[in-house]
Image: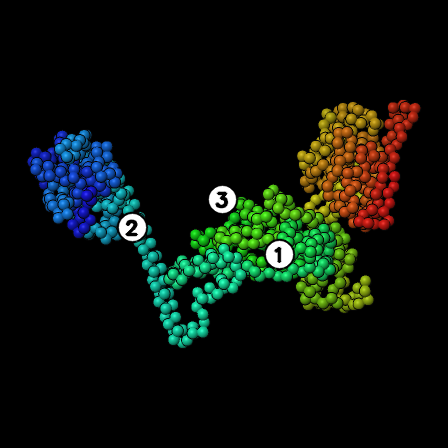
Amino acid sequence: MPEWPHNGAIGFSVAVNSMHYTGVLMTQSSQKTLDLQVLPLRDVVVFPYMVIPLFVGREKSMRALEKAMDADKRILLVAQKMADIDDPGAVDLHTIGTYAQVLQLLKLPDGTIKVLVEGLTRVSVDQVVEHDGALRGCGIEIASTQEREEREIEAIVRSLLSLFEQYVKTNRKLPPELLQTLSGIDDPGRLADTIAAHLSVRLAYKQRLLETIEIGDRLEILIGLVDGEIDVQQMEKRIRGRVKSQMEKSQREYYLNEQMKAIQKELGDFDDLPSELEELARKIAEIGMPKLVQSKAKSELNKLKQMSPMSAEAAVVRNYLDWLLGVPWKKCTKVRKDLKVAQSTLDDDHYGLDKVKERILEYLAVQSRVKQMRGPILCLVGPPGVGKTSLGQSIAKATNRKFVRMSLGGVRDEAEVRGHRRTYVGSMPGRVVQNLNKVGSKNPLFVLDEIDKMAMDFRGDPSAALLEVLDPEQNNAFNDHYLDVDLDLSEVMFVATSNSLNIPGPLLDRMEVIRIPGYTEDEKLNIATRYLVPKQIRANGLAVEELAIGEDAIRDIVRYYTRESGVRNLEREISKICRKIVKEIALVGVKPVAKKSTKSKVLFAVTSKNLEKYLGVRRFDFGRAEEANEIGLVTGLAWTEVGGDLLQIESTLVPGKGNLILTGQLGNVMKESASAALTVVRSRADRFCIDVDFLHNQDVHLHVPDGATPKDGPSAGIAMVTSLVSMLTKVPVRADVAMTGEITLRGRVSVIGGLKEKLLAALRGGIRTVLIPEGNRRDLADIPANVTRALTIVPVKWIDEVLDLALESPLAPKVAAQLGKSKPRKAHSRVSTVRGKSKGSSNARVRH
C-alpha cells in the first residue's frame, strides 16, 4: 500500500512549542551528516515543524520504519517524483527531503501501519541505496539562510500574513485558530514552512518551497501561491453561485410543470389528445421519408422515449425530429408546362432579356417530353439594377414553383450552407434546409443572390460547400451536417445572380452563365413607361388621371439625372416626381392639364420643359460630337459599367526632347496603346507625309479629357494614331466620325468589347459614322435595328482605311507630291459599310 497522507479528521498539525533533540537537531550554524532509513512519500511533502499522520503499506517502507523504531526513531522523508511508481529507487526521489521524528506507530488490522511523524530540518540527500530490504540514505542537514534586511523581511511577512488571513476566511477547511498560531511565530523561516504546510497547492509547488533555502525567496513564492489560491477560491464561489441558481430555476420549472400537468389532467384537457411521442411516431410513418431517413428518425424517437422530458438532451432530440419532419420529402408543386402562358408571364414582368427567356422556355419544352429532368442551374451575370433577382421571381411564377431568395453577400461561414453538427450548442440546419422547410416544397426555385460576394475565413469556405449543392451529379444526395441524412435537391431549380465573374472556377464550371447587359436608352424608356411609372403612381397613392410623365421627360431623366446600367435610380427619380406631385396636390392643387398624347385630362403633366421644377438642375451630361472639324482632335468611344460614352482624344507638339507626354489619368494599358500609336506613326512617316525627325527638339503631348476620370483599355489605339497623324499633317479630323479599335505595330485594327454600348453612345451624341474593327462585324447581329438604321457602321482592317475615312482630306496625293513620284498613290477605296442590318432587318444595305 502506498504512503498516502491521512485525510481524515486527524489531519496534520505544526509543532509550536520548542523541542530539543540532544545529539540530533543541530543549531543553524552547524551541519550534520546523517545516515538514516528512507521513507518514500507519494503526493505529500513534509515540511519542518509539521506533524502529519502517514499510512504505510509497501514492504520496503514498513521495513524502514521497523529499523527506525529499533534505532532512534529518526527517519528521512523524501517525496517521489512520480506517484505511480510502486518500487522507487534513488533516481525516482527528489534530492531534498525532511529529517523527521517518529512520534507514534500503530499497526492496523489490514497489515498496514499508521505512523505519526514530525518534520525537523531540511536534508540534502546525497545517496540512496537498498540495504537489508529497505532504502537507506545519506544526507546533510540544510539550515535556512537570510540574505535580505530585516525591514524587507518584515514587510514581506506582513503582506503574506494579510493574504493568508484572507485565504483562511474563504477556506472552510482551515480552522480560524491557525491565525493565532501564526501570530505567535517570530522566526520567518518557520512561519513560511507553517503556511506552506497548510496550502492546497500542487506537489511540485510544495517541493519547490521545500528546496528554497533563502527565507526571503521562500516568502515571496508563498505570496504568489496564496494570491493565486484566493483567485481560484473566488472563481469557485462564483461558479457555485451560478450552478446553484440554475439548479433552483430548473427545480422550480420542473415543479411548476408537474403542477400544471396535474391540473390539466384533473380538468380533462389531455383526455382527447394523443401524446407527443405518439404524434411523432405517426408523422414518421406517414410523411413519406426514404427508408434510411425513417430508420434514423425511429432511432432518435426511441432515444427520446428513454429520456426525462425535462432533460436538455431531450430538447435537442425533439428539435432534431421537428426539423427532420419539416423537410418536404414528398411534397412538390406541379411545374407548369404551357409554354404560351410561361412566355406571357415573362414578357409581362420584364422587358427585353430575350436570352434568359429563351433558355427558360427551352427547359419547359424539354420537360414536357421528359418525365424525370433535373432543374437547370443558371448564373445571371450583369451590373446592378438590371433585374436579375426580380427575373428569378418571374421564372418561379412562369414555372409555377415556390420562390426562395437566399442572399449570399458577406457569407463567410461554411455552416451557413451545410449547417452545424448537433454536438454544438444551439446548432441548426443550413439555410438550404431551412428554406426548404419554410416553403414546404421539394422543387422550389432558389435564387442564390450575390454569389460573387461570398468570402472565406477560419470558419471555412462557403463557395466550396456550394459545390455539392450546385453539382447535378451530387445534389441528389446533399448531406446537411445537422440532419446527417441524404437530401435530394435534383428537382430544385437554382438561379444564381452575380455582378461579375469573380467566382471560384470549380463553382463557375457547374453553372450555365447568361450575361445580362445594361439596358439601352430605348429599353429604359420602355421599362419606365410600361412598369416604373404605373408602379410609382400606385405606390404614392396617385390616380392615373392625376399625373402623366411624357416620353421626352423620361428620356431626359435617363440622360441627365441617372448614370447607371440598370433602372434603380430611374425609379427613384420617378418616385421623387410622384412625391412632389402628391405634396403639391395636398398643399395647393392646380387645374387639370391636357396630356399631349391623349385627349384625357390629367392634373399634372411632366414634360422636358418643366422637368427641372421637380428634379432640379441636371446632374449629368453625355458626350456630344464636335461642331467643326479640328486638327488633332478625334472622337473615340469608351465603355463603362453604366454604359458607353464619347471620348475626346487630342494631341499637340510642344518644344522638348522627343518625349511622349500622356495626361488624363490613363491606365497602364492605355499608356501602352499610346506608345504603340506613336510607333505606328513613326514607322509610316513617309507614307503619311510626315518628317521622320518630327520628334527632334519637340515633345508630343497626348491628352484625354476629362482629367478627373481614370481611363484604361486598349480600344483607343486607332483614335490615338488618327489624332497624331492629324496633328503632324495639319489635316483636320471629321467631327461626325467616331472610332474604336486596338492598333498593332503593323497597323492592323484588332477587335474590342462593349460594341453595343459604344454604338448607343455614338447615336446619342450625334455621331453619324462609326469605324469598328472588322473582327467585330459578327457582333452587329446583337445591335438593335433602330441603332444600325441611324448609324453608318464601317468595319476596317488597317489604319490606312481609318485615316482615309476619318481625315477631312486624303493623305495619298500629298504623299505622292512630296516623294516626287510620276503617279500618285491610289487612295484607299471605301470599305464595306454596314447600315441597318440587325435582327432580320429588311432594309439593311452593304456599300462597297
Q: Amino acid at mark 2?
A: Gln
Of residues 395 and 45, the one nearer the viewer is: 395
Mark seen at residue 174:
none
Asked whether residue 599 appears in the rendered view, the answer is yes
Q: Quadrant of residue 104?
A: top left
Spatial separation of the CA atoms under disc 2 and disc 1: 59 Å
Q: Quadrant of residue 507?
A: top right
Foreground tag (3 vs 2): 3
**Residue appearing at x 15%, y 35% in the figure:** 134
Q: Circle 3 sits in a helix, a strand or a loop, which is it? A: loop
Foreground tag (2 vs 1): 1
Question: In terms of sequence position, does the residue under pointer 2 or pointer 1 come before the other?
Answer: 2
Of residues 561 and 643, the one nearer the viewer is: 643
**Residue appearing at x 40%, y 62% in the figure:** 305
Within-10-Å neighbours for mark 1: few <14, some 14–19, many 20+: many
Q: Circle 2 sits in a helix, a strand or a loop, which is it? A: helix
Residue 422: image location, x then y, percent = 45, 53
Q: Circle 1 sits in a helix, a strand or a loop, which is it? A: strand
**Residue appearing at x 68%, y 52% in the figure:** 386
| Residue of label 2 | 233
Q: Quadrant of the C terminus?
A: top right
Residue 435: image location, x then y, percent = 56, 57
Q: Is residue 322 left or right of residue 77?
A: right
Residue 818: image location, x then y, percent = 87, 25
| Residue of label 1 | 445
| Residue of label 3 | 458
What's the colour scheme? rainbow
Q: Residue furthest right?
A: 822
